[in-house]
Image (cartoon, helix red, strand yellow):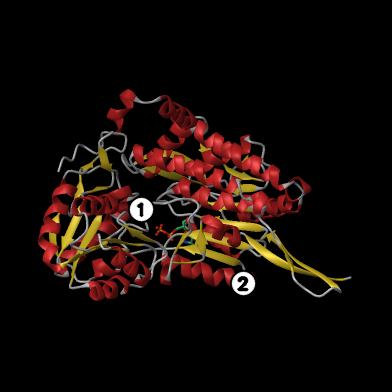
Amino acid sequence: MSNASPASASAAASAISAGHRKVLEWLESSDSKRMLIGGKWVDAVSGKTFETINPSTEERLAYVAEADSADVDAAVAAARRAFESASWSGISPHARTRYLLKIADAVESHADELAVLETLDNGMPLSFSAARVAQVAEIFRYYAGWPTKIYGTTNPTDSARFIYMLREPMGVCGLINAWNVPLVMAAMKIAPALACGNTAVLKPAEQTPLTTLRLAELIEEVGLPPGVLNIIPGFGATAGGALVAHPGVDKVAFTGSTAIGKQILQSSASNMKKVTLELGGKSPNIIFPDADLDKALATAVATFCGNSGQICSAGTRLFVQESLHDEATERIAQIAATYKVGSPFDADTKLGPLISARQMERVLSYVDAGKSGGARLSLGGDRVGNRGYFVEPTVFSSVSNDMKIAREEIFGPVLSIIPFKDEDDVVFKGNDTEYGLASAVWTSDIARAHRVARSLKAGRVWINTYAEGDPVMSMGGYKQSGFGRELGSESIDAYTQTKSVYMRL
Ligand code: ADP
């Protein structure tokens, strides 16, 4: 494996792009990044700030205003005022379309900058963040098409009545995001929320607040009325907890761990908030021997290494038929060994750092669990360098589905290769998990492909591919991977409610 010095982020600085230079200026433009409440950039009521760290260098990128319950109160009040005001609730759907289109344009015209900032704050390779920014523009554009198509219905009845149903926004939405793809998650929540006429208070993850703040600046510049979108950076237990429990919030959309998702479901019960939860996964990626093996194995590596494994839908349980196990393991290890771990600004880097020291320690503790649990370590397993949170692509083979590394979400570049006997066996094992976020099947037998796709209990199934997405397709989890769906028309359902109107003629 070619593991160039991961601390070489500064080496890349010699050839930084115009976008990179703008980001450095933006970071230096203030002592701390403020929060957005009611159209104004403000400090926390407490005056507190917290640091956000570059995971490649362990250096501080910025101080950020730290919201707690007083700021959440102010943000929810601002969102409520905006929701009630004619400058938002009274405007035509065409006007909401125009706002969303302008946001998409603003994202595209600042794409370099946003990609660099995402890479600095999160550590994802620059090519990966650039692709995510393109996705963000696409999501805003997709939802820009919706405001004029959110129909109610005129319903059949007798001649003495006129009855119809209106589809209306929920009101104030509390949006809480994880750190692994911050901008995409922000777009997946902000775009449908605004398309449907809601207002929002968004808490980005404490590890990665910067791109959400920069996106909010761009959104402000398109002239959105004050208070329609509010951003409150801060920690989960304080800012997040206050937002979820707030009686002025009508709906909560959350992306994060299953454990916190369960807490959110409980605390949003206080005023019966409508809730959507996008949670963890331990997705089966199933390869039958009749598949295009070159493609299947190369994709298997790309999916468990993508974003250094910090993707909730990553194919972390790779099922291969027993006869194929040794060959597949050898080829997977060979391919993964060519994946360069290093500065996310180097063009040939495939794996940037993990998000934090805590996450790196967690991932390495799973490597220990794999070894002590009896799996065969076929590649990797160690930290790379001693600065930045870099971990090698790690492959365990001869894993059984009941081992800890096959049951728990690791959120790092760790693959478990699990042998199976036949189709029934792999469908059983693939589904034998508390999660159900995503899955894949590789085969040249069309009937088997669709049979297995139907049998897998997961919100997404890929056939002879992995990790493809499109804003027109919803995503979400079966079982403990979630509650409700994001993207597609299902997000429109999730950010609206219906009202039945009866009139006697
Ligand atoms: P991870 O373990 O990957 O950081 P979490 O589920 O802990 O995932 O965090 C995801 C998001 O949820 C973050 O924005 C975090 O601040 C927030 N969060 C954490 N705990 C709570 C909580 N008790 N209430 C509301 N939000 C929370």
Q: Quadrant of the N terminus?
A: top left
Q: Nearer the viewer, residue 11 or 398?
A: 398
Contact (CB < 8 A) between labels 1 and 2? no
Residue 23 shows which numbered tag? none
Taking the image as shown, residue 327 lies to the left or right of residue 5, namely left
Q: Seen from this angle, which residue lies furthest right?
A: 505
Q: Does the beta carbon at disc 2 come under 8 Å from ligand 1?
A: no
User: x, y (%) of residue 185?
Assistant: 48, 51
Q: Nearer the viewer, residue 404 or 194?
A: 194
Residue 270 shows which numbered tag? 2
Q: Quadrant of residue 442?
A: bottom left
Check disc 2 and give the amino acid type: Ser
User: x, y (%) of residue 86?
Assistant: 78, 48
Measured Cα–Cα span from mark 1 to mark 2:
36 Å
On the question of residue 71 being in view, the answer is: no
Q: Nearer the viewer, residue 251 or 431?
A: 431
Q: Does the beta carbon at disc 1 come under 8 Å from ligand 1?
A: no
Task: Indicate the secondary structure of the residue bearing disc 1.
Answer: loop
Q: Quadrant of residue 326?
A: bottom left
Q: Quadrant of the C terminus?
A: bottom right
User: x, y (%) of residue 199?
Assistant: 65, 52
Taking the image as shown, residue 162 lies to the left or right of residue 304, namely right
Check disc 1 and give the amino acid type: Ala
Taking the image as shown, residue 75 lies to the left or right of residue 416, namely right
Task: Indicate the secondary structure of the residue bearing disc 2.
Answer: helix
Q: Which residue is mark 1?
A: 467
Reply above or below: 333 against 154. Answer: above
